Image (cartoon, rainbow, N blue to C red):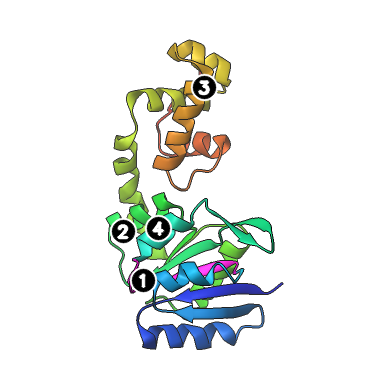
Amino acid sequence: MTIQILLADQDNLSRRKFYHELNTQPDIQVLAETGSGYHVMVLLEILEPDIILLDLNLMGISGIEVVRSLCDKRFEHSGQQKHAPHVIVITDYQDRQYILSFLSAGVKGYLLKSEPVEAILAGIRQVAVGHVALSQSVQSEMVYLIPEITRTLTKKESELITLLAHGLSDDDIAQQLQISVSAVRSHLQNIYRKIPWIRNRSEIVAWAWINRLVTEVQ
């Protein structure tokens, strides 16, 4: 299976370098390249890439604006709806706020241009099969992001996570917190949004135990 890529980078030299490196791989094909965020959106109306390799700096529309437009959006292709492709940010920036902003927006990878090309190729292949890809130094920054993310959780959301980690159902959680079941599900959606690498209940529970939001078994 060939991984089809849309490459977006305002830096012509950088873009041409990645275009050449990617197209030498037998399992990767660059469908198109652009330095414009606006052109990314236009190209998605006619192309069906698996992954967008996206720099933060783009002409017209910024990288974060493109990501926010793409994530969870559907596009029409041949009369059928299709989910937006996965986005991998490739950049020189490893500021925590950049990382958190893009992960919160829904990107599946955050890779640094300074990485060896082999690491970038490995990250692309990881995302193509459904995993998240982060450069090693980005992973180190994530250690410091955990407390920041925890502070964004409301008291009710933290209580819900604790009850979920102890195996309670939605009905039981609603009863314990004295809220409706629909409110429980609404809080869960907020938690998914605030903790960008969490995609389901099992991952919430694992995250809670790993980060010591829960420290004892009831």
Residue 6 percent across, percent down from the top left: 53, 74
Q: CA distance from mark 4 to mark 1?
A: 15 Å
Residue type for callout 1:
Thr
Label annotation for residue 98: 2
Q: Main secondary structure of the magenta part?
A: loop
Q: CA distance from mark 3 to mark 1?
A: 40 Å
Q: Nearer the viewer, residue 174 or 137?
A: 174
Which residue lies under the disc numbered 1? Answer: 91
Q: For numbered disc 2, what is the local secondary structure? A: helix
- Which comes sooner in the sequence, label 3 or label 2? 2
Q: CA distance from mark 2 to mark 4?
A: 13 Å
Please rate how many residues cluster around mark 3, counting C-alpha atoms within 10 Å: few if below 14, some from 14 to 19, many from 20: few
Residue 22 percent across, percent down from the top left: 55, 82
Please rate how many residues cluster around mark 1, counting C-alpha atoms within 10 Å: few if below 14, some from 14 to 19, many from 20: some
Which residue lies under the disc numbered 3? Answer: 182
Q: CA distance from mark 2 to mark 1?
A: 10 Å
Left or right, 202 with reference to 161: right
Please rate how many residues cluster around mark 4, counting C-alpha atoms within 10 Å: few if below 14, some from 14 to 19, many from 20: some
Residue type for callout 3:
Ser
Q: Nearer the viewer, mark 4 or mark 1?
A: 1
- Which comes sooner in the sequence, label 4 or label 3? 4
Q: CA distance from mark 3 to mark 2?
A: 33 Å
Residue type for callout 2:
Tyr
Residue 125 percent across, percent down from the top left: 59, 68
Q: CA distance from mark 4 to mark 3?
A: 34 Å
**Looking at the picture, does residue 4 appear above or below residue 71?**
below
Q: Nearer the viewer, mark 3 or mark 1?
A: 3
Left or right, 11 with reference to 82: left
Which residue lies under the disc numbered 4? Answer: 139
Q: Residue furthest front?
A: 79
- Which comes sooner in the sequence, label 2 or label 4? 2
Answer yes or no: do the residues labelled 2 and 1 have beta carbons within 8 Å? yes
